[in-house]
Image (cartoon, rainbow, N blue to C red):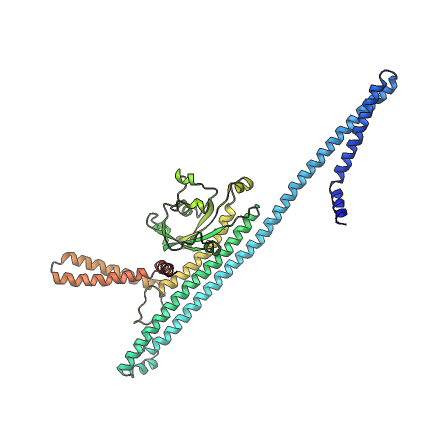
Amino acid sequence: MKGGSVVKIFIRKWYKTIGTTLSLIFNSFGLILSIVGIITNGNKDVSTTIVFFVLLAAEIFLILSIIYSIFSVFNDKSKLIKVNEKINEIERLTNANRIIFENNKSIVTTFKDCTDTLSLRIKSYLGNNMRLNELNGQLCSDEKKKEYEELDDNAKNKIFDHVKIERTKEFFTFRDTLIDDYNRFLGNITIILRRSLEEYILTKNCSSNISVTVKQLNEPTFYNQIDKKKVRVFTAFRDNRTYNSKKRMETWQKSFSIDKNSDFAMSIEKEYYIFNFIEKQHLEQGLYQNETVSFYENYNSGVTCTIHSCVEGERKLFGYLACDSLFDLKVKKKYGRNIFDWNCANLLMYTAHIIAMYLEKYLTIWDSYCVDFNPDEPISMRTPEFLEKKEKDLHYRYDILSQELSQIEDTTEREKIEIKKQKIEKEIDKLSANSFCNVMIDKINNSRYHN
């Protein structure tokens, strides 16, 4: 039964070719008979010879017509195959666009959910500290303050010590929770983006794996203030599949400069940089720059774009979003040189803007509550301007003391000023150590030591 259906399908598909081929065979047989008739008849009967010649000409014409028909059939089949391939390509692209559209919606939803979570974190942190402040008679109503003032010194000291311990616990819990939120957001975003990119290159019949990476500056920098030699860039996050592969696990381990990496430098100029099939020789010839000299072992093609915000016409750079893959020569021959193209860059830029909006809010919270912490002081609503003002004040005081030190010769006075300078240096170092990037570097390094 199955064999019969296969034959039916074959006949339906190729019936024109089969009919034309049979006609060719019969006409060829007729042509042979005509030739044989002419040879055997000779000059015996002129009219018969003429008939045979007419038949010969007719058979030749028919055979040529049939051959043309056969070529036409195969040509039509070839065109039909190309049309079907184009239809399949359009269907793949339509399906990919549908999936990418849904993924883009998921990216926005992820951003909304994660920023809402940040707002809840702040509300919870301030709420918990408000109760501690009231317990310690700080930033509270007159009634609560009066109750506190009526306590004896021993009770006040016990409350102060308890509040100090609890504030410290709250602080580290809050900070660790923020780090978890950061990793969760980037984890979800990179997975969604990777799926979109792989879905897109699949429309080109290319099914290679893609890696997605987030690179972050040590601190956000306005474009007009960027020093490409001094600004440091860290690998902040890798998509889960790449990280779990154990081949490219490094995060917050090494810093890179902008001017020594083509993809970083070029992205600043036009927001994105696309490269396909970069080889080791391009690095050696100076046509491509990369501080990771063995990059070609892990990837040879990719896209990098900036993660930046734009407020009142001024752009602020947070870092870079990059995707890459290792394509072999078979892929190059089969699918062409431009596997990664502007459409891939567009997907990255869309996601990069979402990440920039998240980092804008996230780092605002971090700078407000996680950099300048003192368990002896009450926790209240803050803004990054508070930290900025304190840093400027510390540097100003440090400079004043340095000037005074250069003008004083008395040893005792110089020692007093040196002590003041050291205290200020400690405060500045403390603020620097509590910056987001430095905390992440320290956290990752400590986890590596314990593993």
User: Is 405 rendered above or below residue 229?
Assistant: below
Q: Residue furthest top?
A: 43
Q: Nearer the viewer, residue 197 or 270?
A: 197
Question: Which residue is drawn at the image coordinates 18% and 61% (left, top)?
Answer: 418
Question: Which residue is drawn at the image coordinates 84% and 17% (left, top)?
Answer: 42
Q: Nearer the viewer, residue 74 or 117?
A: 74
Q: Nearer the viewer, residue 419 or 112?
A: 419
- The percent coordinates of residue 402 (x first, y second) are 19, 57
User: Is 83 rendered above or below residue 64?
Assistant: below
User: Quadrant location of the C terminus?
Assistant: bottom left
Looking at the image, how many numbered discs can be counted on the residues? 0
From the viewer's perspective, is 274 left or right of 7?
left
Q: Nearer the viewer, residue 329 or 85?
A: 329
Question: Which residue is drawn at the image coordinates 48% and 62% (left, top)?
Answer: 112
User: Is 143 rendered above or below residue 322?
Assistant: below
From the viewer's perspective, is 108 left or right of 46?
left
Q: Which image quadrant for residue 12?
A: top right
From the viewer's perspective, is 392 left or right of 85?
left
- The percent coordinates of residue 358 (x first, y second) are 44, 59
User: Is 66 rendered above or below residue 371?
Assistant: above
From the viewer's perspective, is 84 left or right of 234?
right
Q: Residue furthest left?
A: 410
Task: Answer yes or no: is residue 58 visible.
Answer: no
- The percent coordinates of residue 196 (x first, y second) are 53, 53
Task: Answer yes or no: is residue 178 visible.
Answer: yes
